[in-house]
Amino acid sequence: MKEPEKQGICDKIFFTGFFKTHARSLRNYLYYKFGDGDLADDITQEAFIKLWQNCADVRHPKSFIYTVAKNSALNHTANKKVIMAYTKNNPAKETDYQAPDYLMEEEEFRKKFEKALSELTEAQRTALLLHRVEGKKYREIAEMLGISVKAVEKRIHGALVALSEKIENFR
């Protein structure tokens, strides 16, 4: 880290610029890692508040916000599991007037895909969603996750192979 960044993070103008530079990226990282947009927004805000509160002690602000955010999100995981269990047991009612067997097939495929996606490793799922949904380049993902571009390629390839095998077995 550059020395001016270390000294400047407590400066309101520098902090504002740092926020504008990193908030969206952190929010997207959290969204694709944990799958909850509201949670990602809340935790992003919480991470920057903690950075501001501890600015004098923080040596690496970018690492700090990602660490705080990841830890906060993991703390919310238990609550998310309860919500997911409730949603699974109480699915939303379809209001479409499509053929019942098509709706059943579509729902069955969606469940199979979600199950296959959830069975990916966290690393594979995060890399895949950042690339395919967010449109991030491998280099950007590597920088966000602190890994090599080759590792990103390997994770995405592994995710696609695993999804392909699990979805193919569906038919």
Image (cartoon, rainbow, N blue to C red):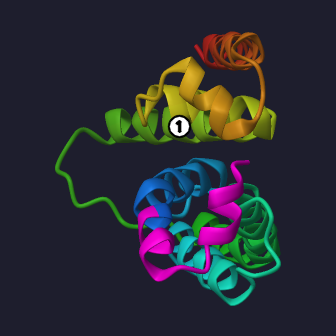
Q: Amino acid at mark 1?
A: Glu
Image coordinates of residue 136 in percent, x first then y, are 46, 29
Name the residue tied to disc 1.
108
Q: Which residues are magenta?
A: 1-17
Q: In the picture, residue 69 is in which quadrant?
A: bottom right
Helix, strand or loop for disc 1: helix
In the displayed orientation, state which residue is furthest to the bottom: 53
Q: Residue at x 69, y 89 (%)?
A: 53
Q: Residue at x 59, y 76 (%)?
A: 48
Q: Nearer the viewer, residue 4 or 107?
A: 4
Q: Quadrant of the C terminus?
A: top right
Q: Is residue 154 above or below residue 135?
A: above
Image coordinates of residue 133 in percent, x first then y, are 43, 34
Q: Is residue 98 visible?
A: yes
Q: Is residue 25 above or below residue 167?
A: below
Image coordinates of residue 31 in percent, x first then y, are 54, 55
Left or right position of 117 against 41: right
Please say whether residue 134 is one of the residues in the magenta stretch.
Answer: no
Left or right position of 96 against 100: left
Q: Residue at x 64, y 39 (%)?
A: 144
Instruction: Label the magenta part by its dominant secondary structure.
Output: helix
Q: Nearer the viewer, residue 105 or 153?
A: 153
